[in-house]
Amino acid sequence: MINEIQVKSILNRHKKRDSWFLDDYSVNPYGGCSFNCAYCYIKGSKYGENVARALSVKTNAPELLDKQLSRRARKGEYGIIALASATEPYLPVEEKTGMTRRLLEIILEYRFPVHVGTKSRLVLRDLDVLKEIDERAILPDDLKPKLKHVA
Ligand code: SF4
């Protein structure tokens, strides 16, 4: 059974935009990662060497994300969200928890653009939400001329 934790914040704002993926924010629905890839850069971080053992789901993530994105949207602080930066958003456990999908639905509601990094086919389950995000998301002003879909 997966460990359940409560966190204080779910939306991390980067000090500087990522120059490769162009994200200004990141969201990690899980702590640790059951894939435990040999090359994973989170190994040796607070999750230790075996990041599969550290796996947990952040149960209060949806309420927090709703609050944090609503505040950012009110101020017009749109930016690409990396989902996720320190875990895999489509772990096998996601089939049961649906946590990543709930977070995507909130991201869609507030019209933030998202970048999903995954090695799992489970992402196909959420193509409907991802497509809608792609159509409706509001890009930060400076990225509008550079990226294809703009709102
Ligand atoms: S899937 Fe990504 S986050 Fe998970 S262990 Fe592999 S590299 Fe790390």
Image (spheres, helix red, strand yellow):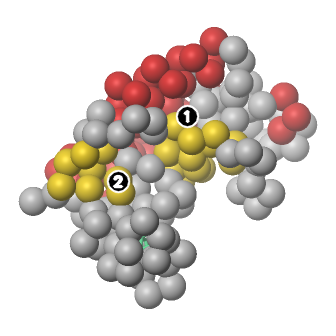
Residue at the spot x=60%, y=31% of the render?
Answer: 112
Q: Amino acid at mark 2?
A: Tyr
Which element type, helix, strand or loop, lies under badge 1? helix
Q: Is residue 106 above or below residue 114?
A: above
Is residue 151 something that shows in the picture? yes
Q: Is residue 127 above or below residue 66?
A: below
Question: Is the residue marked by circle 1 packed among few (<14), some (14-19), or many (20+) residues within 10 Å?
Answer: many
Front-most of residues 111 and 132: 111
Residue at the spot x=80%, y=57% of the render?
Answer: 19
- What numbered label is drawn on residue 133? 1
Question: Residue 96 appears at what percent x and percent y?
Answer: 17, 51
Foreground mark, 1 or 2, reads 2
Q: Give whichever of discs 1 and 2 has the lower sequence position.
A: 2
The quadrant in which residue 62 appears is top left
| Pointer 2 residue | 30
Q: Amino acid at mark 1?
A: Ile
Q: Is residue 142 above or below residue 44?
A: above
Specify the quadrant that holds the C terminus.
top right
Front-most of residues 145 and 48: 48
Which element type, helix, strand or loop, lies under badge 2? strand
